[in-house]
Amino acid sequence: MSTNRFFGIICFWASLLSTASAQYSSGPGMSVSGEIRSGSDAALNEFMVEVYDLRTHAVIERESVSHGQFQLDHVPAGTYSVRLVTTPGGNPLVEEFHEFEPGGAPLVLDLPDRPSDRPISGIVSLRDLEHPVPKKARQEAFEAQQFAHANNLPKAIAKLEQAIRIDPSYRDAHINLGVLYVRLGRTADARAEFQKALDIGPPSAPIYVDLALASSALGDYPAAEAFAHKAQELDPRDATAQGVLDFVNRTAMNPTGVTR
C-alpha cells in the first residue's frame, strides 16, 4: 500500500499561476496545435484535451485527440491548465500549465507509462528503514487518498492529520496534508507542513519545490527563490524550480501585475 506523494504538487501551479495569469490580457481566441507522445503502444485516439481557466474554474475548450494530434481553435491569450483526459471533466492523466500567446510553439504532452510500469520513486533513507511507518498511519493515509480523489477534502485532511498524530515523523503525510491545505487556500499552513517534511529529512528537490511554490504564492519571493535554487542544486533538470525562478523574476520586473 503506497501513498508516496499521492496528491502531487500540481495544485500549487494552479494556486501560483491563477495569480500570474492576471498579468496577461484575454484577447481574441487563437489556434494552437499539439500532439500527444507516448513511449508505449497506447492508443492515442481515446483521449481529449481540455483547457481549464483557473480564474473562472471552467473548461474553455475541449477537443478530441486524433492519431496523437489535436487542434485548439478558440483559446484566449493567458496561462491555463492543459489536461489530458479520457472522459469530459475526468481525472487528468496529464496536467500541465502553459502560457498561450500569439506565435507560440505547438503543445507537446507526454503520456506517462502505466502505473504498473513505473518504478517506485523517491529516496529511502536509513531512518525510513529503521523506523517504518506504522500500519495504522499508512491506512489513514490510504483512506485520505480515497477521500481526496472523491474531492472530499475535509475528510481527507482529517485522515492525514490522524496519520500524523499516530506517527509525527510520517513525511509523506506532511507533504500531502500541505498540498490539501493549498487547495483550501491555507497556503501558510501548507508551507509549515512542507517545512516539517524537510526537517524530517532527507533533503529532497520536490519538497524544496513545494516550499518555493508555497512561498511564491504567499508573496515571499526571496524565500521562493532560495528554495528553488536549493531544488536545482539537488536536481538541475527540475523544470518546476526553474518556473518558480522565472515567475519571481517576472514579478520583480513588474510588481504591480499591470499588463504592458
Image (cartoon, helix red, strand yellow):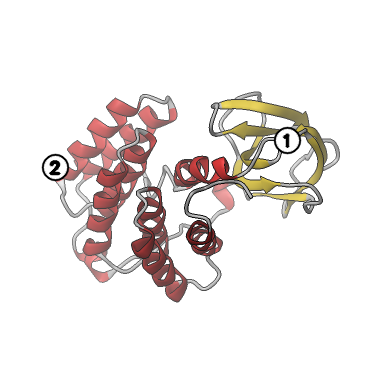
Across and down, in percent, residue 144 comes to: 32, 34
Q: Which residue is mark 1?
A: 27
Q: Number of labelled discs?
A: 2
Q: Secondary structure at mark 2?
A: helix
**Residue 191 spot, x, y in % from top left:** 29, 51
- The x and y percentages for residue 198 are 27, 62
Residue at the spot x=34%, y=65% of the render?
124
Depth check: 108 or 16 in front? 16
Q: Which mark is residue 63?
A: none
For the residue pair 158 and 1, the one nearer the viewer reads as 158
Nearer to the camera, 202 or 42: 202
Q: Quadrant of the N terminus?
A: top left
Q: Residue at x 73, y 35 (%)?
A: 27
Q: Disc 2 vs disc 1: Cβ atoms closer than 8 Å?
A: no
Q: Residues within 10 Å of mark 2 (few under 14, many from 20)?
A: few
Q: Amino acid at mark 1?
A: Gly
Estimate the spatial distance between the alpha carbons at disc 2 and disc 1, rounded to whole Å: 50 Å
Pick out the residue farthest to the right: 67
- Judging by the rendered image, the residue that carries numbered circle 2 is 165
Decide: few, some or many residues near mark 1? Use Cα within 10 Å; few <14, some 14-19, many ≥20. Answer: few
Q: Is residue 95 above or below residue 254?
A: above
**Residue 37 horizontal side relative to residue 194, left or right:** right
Q: Amino acid at mark 2?
A: Arg
